[in-house]
Image (tube, grey):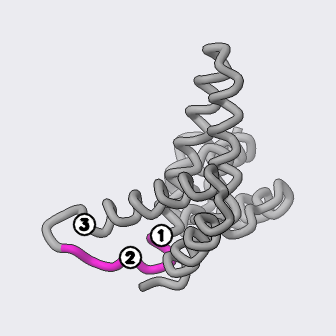
Amino acid sequence: MSELKARLKSDLTTAMKARDKVRTGTLRMVLAAIANEETAGSAQRALDDDEVTKVLVRETKKRREAAEAFEKGGRTEDAANERAESDIIADYLPKQLTDEELAGLVDAAVAETGASGMKEMGKVMKVLNPKVAGLAEGSRVAAEVKKRLA
């Protein structure tokens, strides 16, 4: 079992003992998503920490998008619940890159690929994605690359 998954299970037990309903529900949901990912496909497998992090990033994105949809629909209480869940999941993710750090990585990737226009954005993203996996949201990375190549 990965260290991150073990930490999630341990924190779930702690949250249950503390009767923290939001944290308990969120951690159960995340562990269920991890279990679904482990059983998906033709054979069951155990996820490593990187794969668990990808699941956590995906779950955080779902919560953020749901919160935005609830806000647009005027359901502020539901939006607040989704944001609270997103914040709990974010505690288990690596520290996100600052704008300056991301800009530096993008500049390095542009220099490495020799990209000069928007048509070469794919080359830059291909070099950049492994470096920023789990450390920056994809839309944020894409926006920074577009800004540099425009």
Q: Residues within 10 Å of mark 3 (few under 14, many from 20)?
A: few
User: Mark 2: which amino acid?
Assistant: Leu
Magenta range = 44-51
- Measure the alpha-carbon separation of dots 1 and 3: 13 Å
Residue 148 % position (x, y): 74, 46
Does 61 appear above or below 72?
A: below
Depth check, front residue: 27 or 120: 27
Mark found first going from the N terminus, 2 or 3: 3
Q: Main secondary structure of the magenta part?
A: loop
Which residue lies most toward the left here? 42
User: Mark 3: which amino acid?
Assistant: Thr
Give yes or no for contact between labels 2 and 1 (Cβ–Cβ under 8 Å). Answer: yes
User: Mark 1: which amino acid?
Assistant: Val
Q: Residues within 10 Å of mark 2 (few under 14, many from 20)?
A: some
Residue 103 % position (x, y): 79, 57
Q: Quadrant of residue 128?
A: bottom right
- Measure the alpha-carbon separation of dots 2 and 1: 6 Å
Residue 106 % position (x, y): 71, 59
Quadrant location, the C terminus: top right
The answer to whether residue 41 shows anywhere in this view is yes
The disc at residue 39 is 3
The answer to whether residue 116 shows anywhere in this view is no
Q: Name the residue located 51 percent from the left edge and 56 percent from the top edge.
A: 123
Q: Secondary structure at mark 1?
A: helix
Determine which residue is flagged by label 1: 52
Mark found first going from the N terminus, 1 or 3: 3
Determine which residue is flagged by label 2: 47
How many marks the image carries: the answer is 3
Q: Secondary structure at mark 3?
A: helix
